[in-house]
Amino acid sequence: MRPSTMTHCRACGSDRMFLFLPMGRHPPANMFVRPEDVDQPQSALALNTQTCLDNGMIEEADQIPEGFVRHDLHILPDAATMHGHFEGLAAVLTERAAKNGVQVHVACFDPETADEVRALHGPAQVISTTTTLEHIGDLVGRMDGINGSLADDGWFVIDIRRGREIPATRQFDDVYHEHLSEMRPHSLADRTGMAVVDVIRLPVHGGSVRVFIRKPTSAAPPSPEIIRTPAEEDGAAFKALAARAHAVGDALRGLLAGLKAEAARIAGRGAPAKGNTLPNFFDLGTGTQDYRVDRNPLEQGFLSPGKRLPIHDPAVIADNPPDSLLVLARTFFDGFRTQLAGDGVAGGRPILPLPYPRIVI
């Protein structure tokens, strides 16, 4: 098995790694259980959340070996929010570098693939990726490949979560084995000699940024948004986040237990990867939820990783209505409320677990 903690930052190489939130053993967040395997043991790995004290990036060790997850069911979340989000990205890329036609090269992207593609098609004016670098262990290798593929006056445009805001917003549910890093823009560029020239703040995923990176020969002075970026936190901010995480767990278990004591029926809403972190970390199993619903048809009929809660189509809410709805895909809460209303289903009182558990009236 691969190590469950890291000795060096995957972005800057620093050895100042601080383990601030060990979360116990979890199955991979996308390792859903088939009904016929409900009685079979499920493999689990230690989930140890660390930060690099030199650049503030939140990191998980890359533990999952090839072939470990045989039935990864991840697709885009079912919230309509994401459609407009990606339309915005396409508009930005069109504005900054208009190109006609798209050619597809299927391969694992690394420096060798970058050399091959550049030899076939020449340097790229724009390279873009959205919420994918967070899942890559070899960040430096990927950045070297991007650097080698990009034209001297080209743009590397990425969407990433606002990693530096996680200690304040308590969004620790975004930690899971397949999600290896919560990045800071500069931590990506500095080690490969590239320059961050601009960022745009975005509302999706509970707070994201669109980062514009260029080679130093083409980099203009940084935007005011980059200049305003505050200094990195020390370990105290992450110790506070760990304490808040445990306090959230105590409060959420207490809230759900109180509702269950009143014979309330509780359904979980959403089964994304991050929606499996809290139930496994806080031990929220069948005693706290009766079932879960998600619009993703690939997940319906399966059981959630770890706690093995059955996942149904949201239509089941009309026939078996809950008193409360635990919103596990909380960053898409507004979209869920709209969907339920459109289906003519109230869905019970929503419970939002973060930044602190509360019932939404």
Image (tube, rainbow, N blue to C red):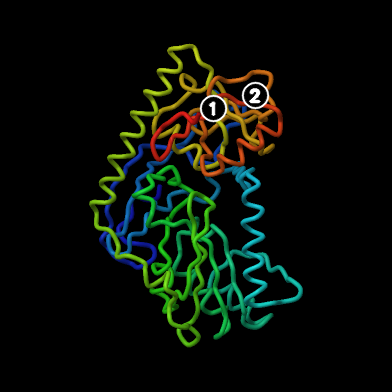
Q: Is residue 13 above or below residue 64?
A: below
Up the image or down, 181 lies above or below 257; here it is: below
Quadrant assignment, res 77: top right
Q: Residue at x 46, y 12 (%)?
A: 262
- Name the residue beneath numbered marker 2: 317
Q: Which amino acid, by three-letter code, is at mark 2? A: Ile
Mark identifier at residue 293: none
- Whether residue 196 sits left or right of residue 22 in the image: it is right
Percent coordinates x, y for residue 47 in the rendering: 38, 43
Q: Residues within 10 Å of mark 2 (few under 14, many from 20)?
A: many
Q: What x and y, as percent, mark residue 359?
A: 46, 28
Q: Amino acid at mark 1?
A: Leu
Q: Residue furthest front?
A: 361
Find disc 1 in the rendering and name its residue: 325
State the image quarter where residue 222 is shown: bottom left
Disc nearer the start of the sequence (2/1): 2
Q: How many marks?
A: 2
Give the spatial CA distance, label 2 vs label 1: 10 Å
Residue 285 pos. (x, y %) = 47, 24
Q: Residue at x 62, y 64 (%)?
A: 89
Q: Is residue 207 shown left or right of residue 121?
A: left
Residue 70 or 224: which is nearer the viewer?
Answer: 224
Disc 2 + disc 1, Cβ < 8 Å: yes
Please say if 184 is above or below 271: below
